[in-house]
Structure formats: C-alpha cells, structure tokens
Image (cartoon, grey):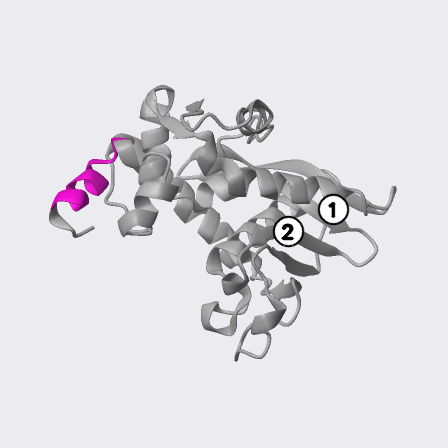
Amino acid sequence: MRVTNKHNLPGMFFRAAINDPYSKGNSDYSATGLASPPRATALMEIHGDDIEVDCSNKVASILGRGTHKAIELGARPGLDLIEERFFADFEVDGKTYKISAQIDCYETDTETLFDWKTTKAWAFSKKAGAGKKPEWAQQLNVGAEIMRRQYYPIHPAKLVICGLLKDWSDQKISHPGYPQLEIVAVEQAMWPREKTIKYIEDRVRLHVAAKQELPKCTEHWGGNRCGRWCEVSSKCDQYQESLKTGVI
C-alpha cells in the first residue's frame, strides 16, 4: 500500500504517516485482523501494492499511536507488560494457524488486561452501548486466550477498555447518556474459553474461505463511510456497484 501526500501537508506529518511500526509479526492472523472483514483482508492481499491511501486519512492512526506512547510513560517496571505481542497456535480443520495479539497493558498485580482507544465520545455514550462494542470485547478475549497459551501461562481476570475521548465537551455532560469524563474505563465481559476458541476458529475459516472466493461484505459501514474508511474500497466491486445503484 502506498501512502500519498496529495494535499502537500507538512513533511513531518507525512513521514509519521508512512512510518507506522505496526506488524502482526510472524503470525497468520492477528486478533485485530481476525475481526476485520474477510473480503477486505483478501482484497488487500491481492491488490495491496496497487492501493493508495492519502496521509490526510491517517490522522486517527497517528493520534492512536501517540496515545499509546504517552500511556507507556505510566508503566511500572516489573509489574506491567506494555505493548507486548504474544503468539499461540490454533488447529482449525486439521491445519495449524499462528495467531498473535499485541496487548496495550497487562497489570500483573491486578491481573487486568487493558486496551486503550482514542475515539469519539459517541462510542461511550449510552446510545452507542456505553463503550461495549462487540469488536472490542472480541479483541480482548482473543488476547486473553493467547496469553493463557504461553509456556508460562498468563490468566487475565479482568478485561478493560479505556477510552480517551478526543471530541469530549463539558458543555454536553448534561445530555442524557453523555460520558461525564473525557477518559472512560469500561470493563468488558470475559467469555468462556469455549466461546473464544470457537470465535477464533470460525473467523479463521471465514478468512481462509475468502482467499478462495470473495464473499459479500456484510461488515461494511455503508455509503460515504465505506469509501472513506475502507482502504480497499477502490478495488471492491461490491462498493463500486453500490455507487451506481445506491444499495450496498
């Protein structure tokens, strides 16, 4: 994927956009990758070298990376595991797949696994589920299962999403269901291990099948959001057809 600078933004910002250190490591899938739409993932593998994304669309990514760097300053040596990637093998239909998860923070003394999100206040409003997005719980539960499978197993007892609300306003705190603080910590449900393992196996099957035959994307955002936030929309005939018909 090529990152462009069509709006002639400052060089420092452009370099920050292209120097993203993220990697799923030596794994077949990451926890976040499993949650991604299989069609989009397969299209990225096919057309990755031909896809262009402008650096102006990387603001959210850069803000998120900055948040993680700042939070690392609060880590306690010897007690907190910070930005560490774990790997574990899962057998699916007779084949072994290596799945990875990079954790934001695990407190060994409280046995709490944290994930930090730089997001809008809406995500933690009552109308939007008060910070309990299904994909956030999925990500944390996959990470917890991978940690349990280490040579020296780690057993998280609590899963927490922490949101830094970039558009929070104290003028809206009187609105029903609006977050009362610009940082919110929400505990997520700890799934039974059987549910987590089944989720991982089912997602692996969907991604493997997508490499053989592209499925219809049922996890799209629709309309303009699909075009703006899905990096493979320019190569997705389902989305291109929707531009003509107005139906996706």
Residue 237 on the magenta segment: yes
Task: Identify which residue, 135 or 177, lies in the foreground.
Answer: 177
The spot of residue 106 in percent (x, y) is 74, 49
Q: Can residue 149 be seen in this view?
A: no
Q: Identify the residue shown where x is 80% and y is 43%.
A: 73
The spot of residue 21 in percent (x, y) is 60, 28
Question: Where does label 1 land, which residue?
Answer: 71
**Mark 2 falls on what kind of element?**
strand
Q: Identify the residue shown where x is 55% and y is 65%.
A: 124
Occupied quadrant, residue 229: top left
Residue 218 sits above or below residue 46 on the image: below
- Left or right of residue 47, residue 188 in this image: right
Task: Identify which residue, 53 or 111, lies in the foreground.
Answer: 53
Looking at the rendered image, the quarter that the N terminus falls into is top left
Residue 83 on the magenta segment: no
> Badge 1: how crowded within 10 Å, few (<14), some, or many (20+)?
few
Q: Residue furthest left?
A: 245
Q: Identify the residue shown where x is 53% and y is 78%.
A: 175
What main secondary structure does the magenta stretch of the protein show? helix
Q: Which residue lies furthest to the top in this view?
A: 49
- Which three-letter amino acid code belongs to the residue tagged 1? Ile
Task: Identify which residue, 108 or 231, lies in the foreground.
Answer: 231
The spot of residue 15 in percent (x, y) is 57, 23
Query: Count the marks: how many?
Result: 2
Residue range highlighted in magenta:
235-244
Rounded to the nearest whole Å, what is the CA distance between mark 2 and mark 1? 9 Å
- Left or right of residue 192, residue 235 in this image: left
Question: Where does label 2 land, which residue?
Answer: 116
> Badge 2: how crowded within 10 Å, few (<14), some, or many (20+)?
some
